Image (cartoon, grey):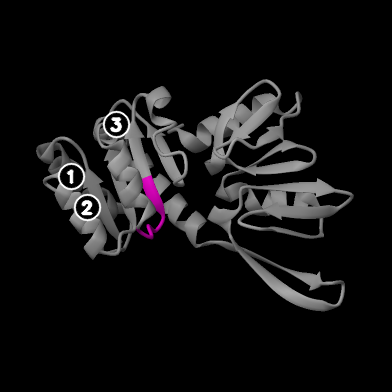
Amino acid sequence: MSIVILTDSLEFSKQLERTLKKILRSHLETNTDFLVPASFQDFSTICQNNIIDSVLIDRSIAQKNQSALNQILAGISLRPAFVLLTPDSDSAENLFPLIPHYVVRTDHLITDLDRVLQHIFTASSYFQKVITFQIRDNDKDLRTVVIKLHRLRYLSCESHRITFHADREYSHVNSMKYYEDYLRPYGFIRTHSKYLVNSHYISTITAEFVILTDQTKIPLSRDRAKDVKLSFSHLTGLC
């Protein structure tokens, strides 16, 4: 694994690196390189010249360099994306609306690193996962459709026909319960009897809708609202 740590304080970054190494040695058998840029320019160079598994960014530096960070992160293939570390969820939610990421809310980063690291590995699994099924073209030829999970915004259902809303839309016959069980470990939340939503694309939850980052409004059932908000809180925060 290759993890870039981007904070305002080089000293803090080094402390973060040492703590992460201890956690990795005690919990996992894996070789991990920690890249700690001394400046924002160094960060840009690292991202251009290395294969990056994850980026840890604290809120303050993200706010100061939002436009440049969006450009850099959108231009590289992260595995899994990046983790934005922040104690201030309100200021963090809209920093990177178009780039899949995890917002890890914590007031004390060092003591919460074990859980932060778990977010990284959960994300890694999520970004490697695909969903596969067969459809018929023009009701004749069978062909296999493969959708990367992180490109799948939500699923909708009508008369047992499931529609997958990704870069394109695909439909086939199955039960929503099947996909709810299959996709739950990867952050998908059932908001309505007819909708299953990828929580990584959720921007806002209102009394009646779940609003995605592209402003799509997904119905939110009254009897599911409490569980949806709780699930979303667990998925985007450290609980």
Mark 2 vs 3, N-terminal side = 2
For the residues labelled 1 and 2, say whether their Cβ atoms are less than 8 Å apart: yes
- Between residues 41 and 15, which one lies in front from this camera angle? 41
Image quarter of the N terminus: bottom left
Query: Which picture quadrant has residue 3?
Result: bottom left
In the picture of the structure, the residue carrying the numbered disc 1 is 40
- The location of residue 10, given as percent across then percent down, is 11, 40
In the picture of the structure, the residue carrying the numbered disc 2 is 44
Mark 3 vs 1, N-terminal side = 1
Q: Indicate the secondary structure of the residue bearing disc 2.
A: helix
Q: Residue at (40%, 51%) from the top-left corner?
A: 81
The stretch in magenta equals 76-82
Position of 62 with respect to 227 (left or right) is left
What is the three-letter code of the residue carrying label 1? Answer: Phe
In the picture of the structure, the residue carrying the numbered disc 3 is 63
Q: Indicate the secondary structure of the residue bearing disc 3.
A: helix
**Is disc 3 surrounded by few (<14), some (14 to 19) or many (20+) residues within 10 Å?**
few
- Between residues 184 and 50, which one lies in front from this camera angle? 50
The number of callouts visible is: 3
**Is disc 1 surrounded by few (<14), some (14 to 19) or many (20+) residues within 10 Å?**
some
**Is disc 2 surrounded by few (<14), some (14 to 19) or many (20+) residues within 10 Å?**
some
Q: Residue at (36%, 43%) from the top-left corner?
A: 83
- Between residues 49 and 112, which one lies in front from this camera angle? 49
Q: Indicate the secondary structure of the residue bearing disc 1.
A: helix
